[in-house]
Image: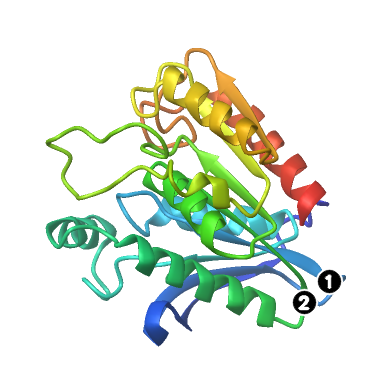
Amino acid sequence: MRDVGDALTAETIRIAGFGGDEIEAYLARPAGNGDRRGGVVVIHHMPGYDRGTKEIVRRFAELGYDAICPNLYHREAPGAAPDDAAATARGQGGVPDDRLVGDVGGSADHLRSLPSSNGKVGVIGYCSGGRQSVLAACHLDLDAAVDCYGAFVVGEPPPDFPIPITNLVDQLPNLRAPLLGLFGNEDKAPTREQVDELDRILTEHDKPHEFHRYDGAGHAFFSVDRPAYRFEAAVDGWERIEDFYGRYL
């Protein structure tokens, strides 16, 4: 997709999510009408619907896509600061998988309803959102999915994990979209061995996928405001994402 520069619009809107619930979402779009274009649903990480996530949404608009991020914690803490909303959501058991699928589905429907839409929608998620990106692509008609170091797509959560969560091994045969995976080789969740297992399962089920792994990078290597940020891995990762979406959206 051609980079359209800084000409974009961004706003907080309301969309219909799981069960018809009205939820908050952040939408960014290239300015002007232009050609028909694909859309991207951005799934935020566990810390929440924060400034860094909104910057990612705007980056996709700069790349020429309509992009949206649903606030997964809107029901628990409408209007709360991201950290407070995340804490509230964790205290109530996190985001149920069926609700996540419904909220992402509502986001994709909103993107497809825009006059600029070419009908194609991809999904991307980071950390917990990486797992949720794969989950959504197992249940929704999406055109491309990106998993950025999503934990527990395979493997078992530790007994003391703060929210109830299961892996997606039994759902992976239903994956409906090509998958791009970006992983740090120093990550503890997912580990190298878990990424190998995911690769094997997808290959066995003939699911189109491509994985890229980075030495010297651990979890959250895209996060520019964290010590975990790794410049070379993040730059290459963005290039991989742009190429992947350019082919499928």
What residue did someone put label 2 on? 116
- In this rendering, the answer to whether 43 lies above or below 130 is below
Q: In the structure shown, which secondary structural element does the residue marked by tag 1 occupy?
A: loop
Residue 4, given in percent of the width and then of the height, sits at: 79, 57
Q: Amino acid at mark 1?
A: Arg
Q: Which picture quadrant has residue 146? A: top right
Residue 140, given in percent of the width and then of the height, sits at: 57, 64
- In this rendering, the answer to whether 48 lies above or below 107 is above
- In this rendering, the answer to whether 47 lies above or below 209 is below
What is the crowding at mark 1: few (fewer than 14 residues within 10 Å), some, or many (at least 20)?
some
Q: Amino acid at mark 2?
A: Ser
Q: Nearer the viewer, residue 123 or 134?
A: 134
Q: Which mark is residue 36?
A: 1
Q: In the structure shown, which secondary structural element does the residue marked by tag 2 occupy?
A: loop
Looking at the image, residue 52 sits to the left or right of residue 165; the answer is right
Task: Answer whether labels 1 and 2 touch (C-beta < 8 Å).
Answer: yes
**Residue drawn at the location 43% of the way across and 39% of the way down:** 150
Q: Which picture quadrant has residue 235? A: top right
Q: Earlier in the sequence, mark 1 or mark 2?
A: 1
